Amino acid sequence: MNNNYTIAPRVLIETYGCQMNVNDSEVVLAILSKSGYVLCKEVSLADLVLINTCAIRDNAEQRILGRLDFFRLEKKKHPSLVVGVIGCMAERLKEKLLEHPAVDLVAGPDAYRDLPRLLESIRATGSKQINTLLSHEETYGDISPVRMDAGGVSAYISIMRGCNNVCSYCVVPYTRGAERSRDCESILREAREVIDAGYKEIILLGQNVDSYKFGDVSFAKLLEMVARLSPSVRVRFATSHPKDMKDEVLLTMAAYPNICKHIHLPVQSGSNAMLEKMRRRHTREWYLDRVARIREIMPDCAITTDVITGFCGETETDFEDTLDLFRQVKFDAAFMFQYSERPGTLAQRHYPDDVPPEVKTARLEQVIALQGELSLESNRRDVGKTFEVLVEGFSKKSASDLMGRTSQNKACVFPAAGHKTGEYVTVLVKDCTPATLLCEVVE
């Protein structure tokens, strides 16, 4: 990197993976901004490139390796360019990443405060730098993230870090460390900041938000505290764990109109045998009970899920149990994946990855097809109804249409008719696809 800047050093941050990573990138930008860095959008202008990575599946890591090959070529054109890998993949692979010729810096999710020192060491010595130490205390609670979509609609706020569940297939506890909840006062302070900045929606984030606990403040209490800051600002959260989803949270959601009526409740499998092997710590019956309770307390609440096909030893009967659970619950939407073995996990150490790839794929295609039918059914039930929609921007398919979401997190497309991003608009659902409600504005 050039030591004699005529302008402030510029950083390009590429973010991959989950919403937590988006929020982490904003924390990183806040830290670097205090050291004089400014954000840029093009690699040709950058002095520093940081790739914030995901390690949840192998194809996510392969994508990052492809980007590193691209940046290796960029460094031939701009030898002073510094390239860093941060986040979960950095934590998992550690020094191995430094073997890549493009990589100058590796930093895990708990080492972001150390980035200015690491970058100074690179400038001073020309040597590669790494910090992948995990922390039992770090929450970045005192840092106000620099939002990369200034003027945007939604703002992510991390309420906790890490995970204690150690599901047998999951690498997250190894890449993000032990669970720790953030000081509730720092969360409220950040929420007030984003409200004052004009954001219309707050999304509270955690690997398992239901286990949030700071002093005597539970997640339900925190949810209420955030919702009461501004009745005109929506509040969402992700992600819930079925074993910790308590009635207290559901009753709080029902009591506040600005808490969105949508729960993402990953099930992963409909088979008790698979759930036990996955170490999910809930049964099929418990899950169905939670779904019933959600619908009893909030009949209009949307429920979405995650599912894995082809986990170790999954039989046809196990898979049929999953399909049957989907039919019973009638999810509004789902994220569906085939099992990808992750090094170092309990499953990788104890269970053979023995479901043939073609079977994994066939089962994934089956559950995708079923969910497509269920999503269409769900959306058809909304035809003829009116919803308040928060406008997020223009539709990707039409410059004359806007796109926004209902409280249930359903995407609506409707004629702009003079409305703008960030407004609340009442729409009437006229038609639908499995993914979208097609609407007109109700004046």
Image (cartoon, rainbow, N blue to C red):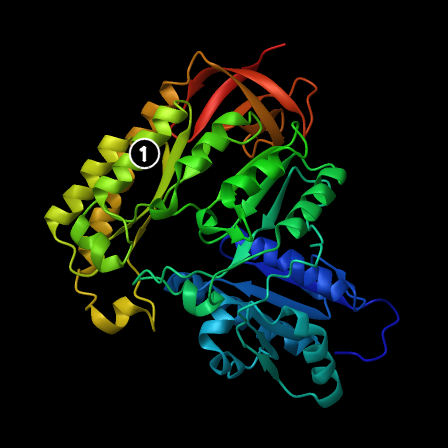
**In the rendered image, which quarter contains the C terminus?**
top right
Q: Is residue 236 at all visible to an observer of this figure? A: yes
Q: Position of residue 384 (x, y in %)?
A: 44, 11
- Relative placement, left or right, of 154 versus 355 is right
Question: Residue 299, image x and y in percent?
Answer: 38, 22
Q: Amino acid at mark 1?
A: Val
Q: Nearer the viewer, residue 263 or 49?
A: 263
Please, is residue 254 above or below residue 215 in the view? above
The x and y percentages for residue 156 are 60, 47
Image quadrant containing the N terminus:
bottom right
Would residue 80 be visible to someone looking at this image?
Answer: no
* Residue found at the very far front of the displayed protein: 216
Looking at the rendered structure, the secondary structure element under dot 1 is helix
| Residue 297 falls left or right of residue 386 | left
Would you place residue 295 above or below residue 73 in this image? above
What's the residue at 18%, 49% (across, down)?
A: 272
Check disc 1 and report the residue beneath it.
291
Quarter location, residue 420: top right
